[in-house]
Image (cartoon, rainbow, N blue to C red):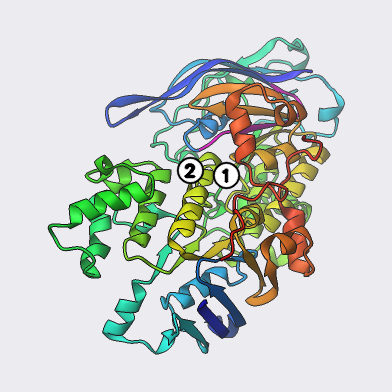
Amino acid sequence: MTLLAVSDLTKRYRRGGKTIAAVDGVSFAIESGETLALAGPSGSGKSTIARLVLRLVEPDAGTVQFDGDDFLALKGAALRARRARLQMVFQDPLAAFNPRATVARVLDDPLRIHAIASGAERPASIAALLERVGLTADLAPRAIHEISGGQRQRVAIARAIATNPSLIVLDEAVSALDVSVRGQILELLLDLQARERIAYLFISHDLGVVRAIAHRVVLLDAGRIAESGDARAVIDAPQSAIGKALVAAAPRLNSTRP
Amino acid sequence: MTALAEIRDLSVRFISDGSKVAALKGISLDVVAGECLAIIGESGSGKSTLALAIAGLLPGSAKIEGSIDWFQGTTGEASAKAPPSALPGISPSRGEIELSSPPSPITGIVERAPAARLPISSLEGEMSGRTEGGVTERQPSTIGASRIPLPGRDIGFVFQDPSASLDPVMTIGKQIAEVAHTHLDLDWPQAYAKAKHLLQRVRLPYPGSAMRAFPHQLSGGQKQRVAIAAAIAAGPKLLIADEATSALDTIVQAEIVALIRQLVAEDGMTLLFISHDIALAAELAERIAVIRHGELVEIGMTAEIVTAPRHPYTRTLLEAHLGLDASPLLRRTPA
């Protein structure tokens, strides 16, 4: 089932009298339970597409169908209700959260705002959320700034899944993590997807990570789609110039390695 | 193998919230003249602290034990083309150093004898994840006269974020010319000519107009090229790149790595490449040192580290690397 269908999405910015198309006629679709990766160099439009899909910025042209609705036409309470099904995780959870808040507070907000659990139920719901992302309930009273980067990104994922979303936009969500922690977070995302059929729009500049976890990939260059298809097929044999350049630039361990 | 610097039992502690935090614990290693040595580790491992200690840029609040001995180098091929520098061979004609005593004659320095024991310079300011803050707060060290390597002249430092290390209200040309003017005894027209030449060497497009540009007018990769030009302007013997490509996308990162490799070869510099990325380090470095929790886990030739790591932590890092040939984590179940 098609969960998200983006068609001819366009966003232009005016800079110094010139108009630049950050996103230029981009179309793609995501099925339920699928990971679609958006990859490309800096300035290719990856994050702008994420913001357009989330309606953090409004497009100049194009349509976004989410769960069968015209997502761009939704307003007010209907938009808020639908937003619960569409969540996001950013690169830097320390910037995304109030640093003085506790873990419990960060997880309490979506449960309260979207009326998912009553006041009396919420401590138990928070404990359950922490367990779903591989943390323990004793983390709840800790301040966001005190916990490690890996724990913080798990809390960001817990907050994202608190509203039982069908799609999570992950914008460079593992890029700032140490490699050992990154592997654990990727495993967590895959486990959640397998258990709860969550779809991911996975934005990354790292083709190694994309190849490891995405079903399909869209390669972007200067706001346009350069090529798309099965993640492994595209990355193993890129056809577009930008695809070839991205693959050639990826750091490699010694090729003689067994 | 000629050591450029011998680091012995180097420990660094910071005072944070009244408690002492050990950032480095008894690190001993040699930096070989002319080599590319990568120091890899995860966040908080102490790799940047080690780079700052070697460069003499640690804040005054840091408690430092151990030693860094610098050697006058040989006239080996690695340094043959290099401009004068206080590391292997002081140019007696250079008068810009604040000397408490006359410079010792260059011929008097015996090869392999410790040329200088580093009194790691003190400067005010707090350490943070990024290292740029240290530089803006730096107080020039005048201790020990000429043979202590001088940051900026004998050691070039490229930081992660060029937006933070370049002055936002000074033209690109002046920022580079200033280094040449300060350290090479050039007058300003000569220093500007040198800066323009350096912009050509780091392959910045339109170097003539870039001289008059300000940092905000350049892209991230272009800014990092400018930062590299400033770092090598005084002809340092040692170039330290601390996560210099981590904020750049993969394609720009590859370009900057290729540029660093070329400049290091052309100028006969020694390169200390600090990174969290073991694959990137393996592409550039002849030797790799792995740092974890402030300790040296292992050090060896790149091929050995990558193909036959001795330490389980190195193996963990290698296994966690997701290269284009890694086996996918995704188990293909129908969506």
Q: State which chain disc 1 sits on.
A: B
Give residue B133's mark.
none
Circle 2 SS class: loop
| Residue at mark 2: chain | B
- Name which of mark 1 and mark 2 comes first in the sequence: 2
Q: Is residue B270 above or below residue A35?
A: above
Instruction: Please report the residue visible at 51 percent of the width from the left and 66 percent of the height from the top.
Output: A33
Q: Is residue A221 above or below residue B241?
A: below
Residue located 52% across and 28% down the image? B292
The percent coordinates of residue B2 (x first, y second) are 77, 18
Q: Is residue B215 left or right of residue B268?
A: left
Using the rendered view, name the quadrant where residue A118 is placed.
Answer: bottom left
Residue B238 horizontal side relative to residue B166, left or right: right
Q: State the image coordinates of residue A166 (x, y, percent, origin top left).
A: 42, 69
Count residues near mark 1 (Cα–Cα under 10 Å), then give few for <14, some for 14-19, many for 20+.
Answer: many
**Type of residue at label 2?**
Arg
Dot 2: few (<14), some (14–19), or many (≥20) neighbours within 10 Å? some
Write down the residue under mark 1: B159
Span colored in magenta: B31-42
- Where's the C terminus of chain A, which quadrant? top right
Q: In this orientation, which residue lies closer to the viewer: A258 or B205? A: A258
